[in-house]
Structure formats: C-alpha cells, structure tokens
Amino acid sequence: MVFFEDLGTNVHGFQGEEQIETTVEDFLDHSPHFTTTQGMYDVEEVGDDDDDWQMVQAKGNQFVVNGQPFYVNGFNTYWLMVFAADQSTRGKVSELFQQASSVGLTVCRTWAFNDGQWRALQKSPSVYDEEVFKALDFVVSEAKKYKIRLILSLVNNWDAYGGKAQYVKWGNASGLNLTSDDEFFSHPTLRNYYKSHVKAVLNRVNTFTNITYKNDPTIFAWELMNEPRCTSDPSGDTLQSWIAEMAAYVKSLDAKHMVEIGLEGFYGPSAPARTQFNPNSYATQVGTDFIRNHQALGVDFASVHIYADSWISPTISDAHLEFTKSWMEAHIEDAEKYLGMPVIFSEFGVSRKDPGYNSSYRDTLISTVYKTLLNSTKKGGSGAGSLLWQLFPDGTDYMDDGYAIVLAKSPSTSNLISLHSTRVAIFNSRCSWKCRWGCRKKNSLETFLYHDDL
C-alpha cells in the first residue's frame, strides 16, 4: 500500500476526463478542529464553553454529534489512570494524547477501575484513594485538551487490576461463602458493590474541570465490563440478567451518555446459525451471546474484539486475515439486521511475540480492519469504528504485552492510521458539503476514500 507523504497536498482523481485536482483541505473545510500538515493533524484546544463539544449519541446505526455523523478511529491505552497517579509518569499521558491527536485519533478506551491492587482506585468496597481518583480526573481533563473522547470501562472480567475475582475476595472477607468468581454476576451483595462503584464514578466531580463525569461530553460511553464471560453458565442467562440490570442502572444515573457492554462478540445459544463465525467451539460456551446480550434495554451500541492470534492460532497466517474480515462482516450485518445499532471493533491487534510476526503483517491486518469498515461506512452501514490495541508513547516498553504500537518507531503504521483518520474525518464532515461539490470533484473524493493504490 502506498501512502501520501503529505496529506495536505493535492489528491489526484483520474475519472476518464481531464485530471481534477482537489485538496484534502477543501474536503475538510467544515471540520474546523483538523488541519492536515505533513500527513498529521493539528488539534485546536477546546474550551469549556465550546458549543462543538457535545455528547456523542447513537442514532440508528450511526453515531452522531452536532447533527453530523461521528465515525470513530481510536485506540486503547488501559493504564492511563495509574500513570497519572505518579508525577514521574503523568507526562506520558499528555504525550500519548498529543501523539494520538497528531494522527487524527478521536476516541481512547481506558480503565476507570483498579480494585484492591497496587495504586488501587477502589481500595475496598466504596472506599477510594482520592489521589488516584484525581489521576483519573487528570486523564479526563487532558483528553479534552486534545479533543479525544474516552470510553471508560468500569470493571475487569480478568484478574488484572482486580477484576471480578477481587469483588469475590471482598465478599468472602465480609463473611460470604463464595466459591466461584462468576458469583460476581449473580450474588446480590457483589452486584451492589459494583453498583456503588458505578455511582461513585458517574457522580464524580472532576477536580480539574469541575464537571461531573455524567455531564461531561469528553466521555464517549460507559463500558460495563472488559470482556465479560460467565463460563459457569453457558446458557447465557446469568450474564444476560447482569447486563440487563447494570445497563438499566447506569441509565438511571446518567441518561445522557451511551452504554456498551464490553463484549468480545462471541455467538451463543440464541443464534445457533451464527456460531459458525466463532473462532473456535469453546467460544460458544463462555456464557456470552452477542445478539441477545445487545438486545438488553439501555445498551446503545455493540462492541466486538478481534484476536485471531489468541483465538485461532498464535502463528501468523492469511487465515487470520480471512477470519478478521468474516468476523467483522458478520457482526456488522447483525448490528444492522437484528440490533439496529452501531458496532465498534473496540480491540484489535497482533502481537510481535507471535511466530511469523513482522510489521508488514501488522499493517496488513490494520488495513483489513479499516477497509472492512469503509466498505460499511460508504453504504451507511453499522460499522462505526475501531480501536487499536494498543497505543504507547516512547519509554513505556516495560508495559508492553506485545501489542504496543509506538507511532514514532512505526512510520508505516502511523501513516496508515493517519490516512484512515483523514478518510473518517471526511465522512464526518460530509453532511456539510455533500450538496456543494460537482460530480467531478465528488469522483476525486471517491478515489481518495476508497482506493488503496494512491
């Protein structure tokens, strides 16, 4: 794939007549917070009273803000709160947001939990470390400076950062006799622990901005849980009950923000015809059920993760790319046909630890995801965006799980991300100018949006 060295230069369209030249800046005239320079974005800071900084909402199978579509090119960096809690590493949070904004990324997914661990936010049920909460405040306020919105996840399925296992430990410490981590989903006491945490986060008044979290448009959405699974009940009933209760609870506290579940996207018993798309037979038995789960009241959009290297085989192969495409297309179709909502592919990536890995393969995987999304976007479909796992600033290699992308060290990947951001920004500003361009300029635009061999 060939990339523009300078996305601010002319885009050439060859449409059978004479060559038409139209600048990308022309297309972005109505996207005032982006200017393209050397393939990068300059982001104007947004003030507290900026009318443009509104809540993003789901409308049909699109996200919208200020009456315009909001397709997402974003990323994950889960550890921002913990880094912000230490003055010696806090600067890395700002550095990351600056670098992400420079390639046009607009949404970051991160943890709003750290339960009972080192630098815990929640030290015990409803007991918080104020300094760590201030660190989360910093993350939210800093994101806004760079016009990046946040998906804040509220608990982990896994043990890292505490997770449901920590809630079970707290329950047993209080005198309960719990034998499975999955009792997090079913035991009334643990459900109440979780609700108390949700309430504490949503009602938090940011010490930097003085804005209550539940009123802050910087927050794109609340995520109920990172990758929920309930293997003790493969029927899916236990998890479905928890999702229904917690989505409704979040909405009772905050009707303004969107809610998503945090699912990986596995198909379950309610849709036996769709289980053929699962990466393996075990995925059907983990207690999740993509279509049924997302039909719960209060859930605004669907989430899906993509990890062919974890789910199919660690060794890199073209089969991983084929799986990625079919997995995405199946979920986009379901979001349109059965759910009537947008879907975000909220984690995807490949580990450099995988046998056969090289950076060219990573770029091909990312291109596959972006291309599949653009195919949906141009038809007005439910493919609403994706979040890379994961973006790191320089000097944080010791946190790397193998999936980290450091933009400064990955120029081809950085160019790829920047190009997709430009295409997404064009779609997001399309309402403003779709009637203004003559068909020849429109053809030039179509070339830029959809053709790889630029």
Image (spheres, grey):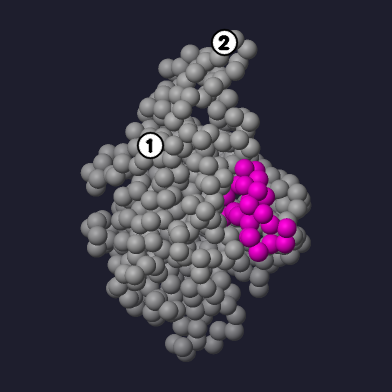
Q: Secondary structure at mark 1?
A: strand
Separation of marks 1 and 2 at Cα, in angstroms: 30 Å
Work out which quarter of the rendered image holds the C terminus and state it.
top right
* Residue 32 against residue 188 in the figure, above or below: above
Name which residue lies at 24% across and 56% down: 209
Q: Earlier in the sequence, mark 1 or mark 2?
A: 2
Which residue sits furthest top? 17
The residue pinned by badge 2 equals 18
Name which residue lies at 46% across and 83% down: 170
Name which residue lies at 46% across and 37% down: 39
Image disc number at residue 336? none
Q: Is residue 385 visible?
A: no
Q: Is residue 205 visible?
A: yes
- Give the quadrant of residue 234: bottom right
For badge 1, the amino acid type reads Phe
For badge 2, the amino acid type reads Glu
Image disc number at residue 34? 1
Name which residue lies at 31% across and 41% down: 44
* Residue 45 against residue 68 in the figure, above or below: below
Q: Secondary structure at mark 2?
A: loop
257 vs 246, nearest the viewer: 257
Q: Residues within 10 Å of mark 1 (few under 14, many from 20)?
A: many
Tell me how many marks there are. 2
Work out which quarter of the rendered image holds the N terminus and state it.
top right
Image coordinates of residue 361 in percent, x first then y, are 67, 50
Image coordinates of residue 339 in percent, x first then y, are 58, 45
Image coordinates of residue 307 in percent, x first then y, are 65, 57
Q: Is residue 3 left or right of residue 148?
A: right
Q: Which residues are magenta?
A: 341-368
